[in-house]
Amino acid sequence: MKQIFIILSIIFSGFNLYSQDTSLKEKALDEFKNEHYDNAIKILEQAEKENPNDAEIYYYLGFFNHYHAYDSRPLNGYDFSYSEKIFEYLDKAIELDPNYGNAKYFYGAECSGNAFQAMQSYNLEKLEYFYVLAYDKGAYPKWLLEYGKNMLASCDKNSILFMGGNADFDICFYLQLHQNYRTDITIIPIGNIDRPWYIKFLKRGLKGAVKKINVNLTENQIDDIHPFKWKTTNVEIALSTKLKEKHKLSLDYKMQWEVKPDLSSNREHSKIESEKAKKRTFLSPRRALFLQIIDDNFKERPIFFSNATSPMFFAGLDKYFQNFGLISKLTPIKTENTAFEISNTEIENLLQKEKLKYFSTIIDTDIPRISGIVFGYHSSVLKLAQFYSEKGNNDEVKKILEFYNNNFLIDFNKEYENYYKAEIKKMIK
C-alpha cells in the first residue's frame, strides 16, 4: 500500500505541475491577446523556470518578445541585446523540437527585423548576414524557395514587385541577395512604405541589394509625410505610348484610378463657408506613398503585386490587375470580363512539373503561420480551369484536373485540396 501511495503521489504531483504549467501558458496567452505584453512575458518566464524543457514556452517567449519590439508601440531601451534574447529563446525551442516550424518562422522574422535596421544604415554586409542566418536556421525551406523563384520568374524584366509581408518578401529578397536571382526587380513590402526612411532608401537604392525606384518628392516632403485631407478622387496615372499600343488604346486614353480615403476622424469640418460640415476623411501616409510610387514609375517600369497580399493595400487598383498565378500585373485598363483578366499562358508557364519539384516537401517542413501561401498554386489551377471552361474546352479542363490530382493532392490540407478538386470537377461536362 505504501508503494502504491508513493506511485500515486508522484503521478498526481506530475499532473499538478503539468496543469500549473498549462495554466500559466493560458494566462500568458490571455494577457497577450489583451495586449498586456509585459505581463504575458513575465508569466512565461515563470513557466520556463518551472518547466525548462517545454519547447512551446520558449517559442512563445520568442514570439511575444518579437511582437513587443516590432508590432506594438516603440519599445523603450530597445537594442540588439533584446534581439539576441529573442534568438536565444527561439534557438532553444528549435533545439527541443527540430521540426518546430513556427519557431523557425519567428527566427526568420527576427532576422528580417534586424535586416531592416541594417538598411537604415545602408550596411550591406549586415543585411546579407541576417538573411543567411534565417536560411541556416530553416526559415526558408525548399518549397518556399521554390515559391519565391516562381514569383520572381513570372515578372517582366526591370519590374517593381509589391509584396505582402515576411512570407513572400523575405524569401524573394534572400534569393536576390544570396542566389543573385532576378536582381533586376525591385521588391517592396507594401506594409513598410509608410516609413519615411524606407522611401528614401528605395529612392536611393543600395548597390548589390536594391535597385532604386523613382520617387518625385523631396527629402523634406518624405520626412513630413502625414495623413492628407482626402475624399474619393479620380487620379490620372501617366502611361507610355508603348503601353497604349500594346493594349490598343487611343493616344488620348486616360487611366483613371479612383482612390478612396482610408482614414477618418470624428471631427466635423468644412473647407469653405458654403460647405456643410462633415466628418473629415484622410489619405494615410501608406496610401499616399503607394499612390506616389505608382504615379512615378508605371510609365517606365512594369509593376506587379504578390497575390498573397491583402487586397486592402491595393486601394482599388486591383481593378486593373491581370492575374499571372502567384502574382498579378498592373495594366492600364479595368480587366474584369476582358481578355486581360487572367493570362492563361503565364499560369500555364507557372504550372510546370519542373517548377513544382519541391512542393510536396512542405509535409516535412511545414511552417504553419505562412504555409497557406502555397494555395496560391491551387487558386492558379482553378483560374486556369475556369478560363478553359468558359471557352468550352472540356478536354483542357479534364487535363487540368488530372494535373491537379497528380501534383497537389498530397494530404497537406485535405479540406482545401478536396475543395479545389471539387470545384474543378464541377466544370467538366
Image (tube, helix red, strand yellow):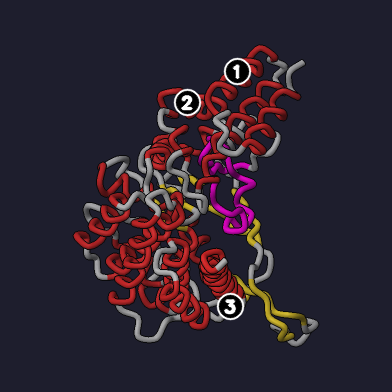
Name the element at disc 3.
helix
- Badge 2 is on which residue? 349
Name the element at disc 1.
helix
- The residue lying toward the viewer, choosing from 138 and 186, is 138
For marks 1 and 3, give the one nearer the viewer.
Answer: 3
What residue range appears in magenta?
Answer: 307-333
Q: Is residue 312 magenta?
A: yes
The residue carrying pointer 3 sits among few (fewer than 14), some (14 to 19) or many (20 or more) residues within 10 Å by Cα, namely some
Instruction: Locate residue 343, reporting x and y percent.
Output: 56, 30
If you read the primary sequence from the N terminus, does the residue marked by circle 1 or circle 2 appear first?
Answer: 2
The amino acid type, in three-letter code, at marker 1 is Glu
- Badge 3 is on which residue? 31
- Badge 1 is on which residue? 402
Which residue is pictured at 57% across the width and 37% down the height? 323
Q: Which mark is residue 386?
A: none
The amino acid type, in three-letter code, at marker 2 is Asn
Residue farthest toward the left in the current orientation of the protein: 125
Q: How much space separates mark 3 and mark 2, taking CA atoms?
A: 48 Å
For marks 1 and 2, give the one nearer the viewer.
Answer: 1
Which residue is pictured at 68% across the width and 69% down the height? 231
Q: How much space separates mark 1 and mark 3, taking CA atoms?
A: 49 Å
Quadrant assignment, res 115: bottom left
Which residue is pictured at 63% across the width and 36% down the height? 414
Q: How much space separates mark 1 and mark 2, taking CA atoms?
A: 17 Å
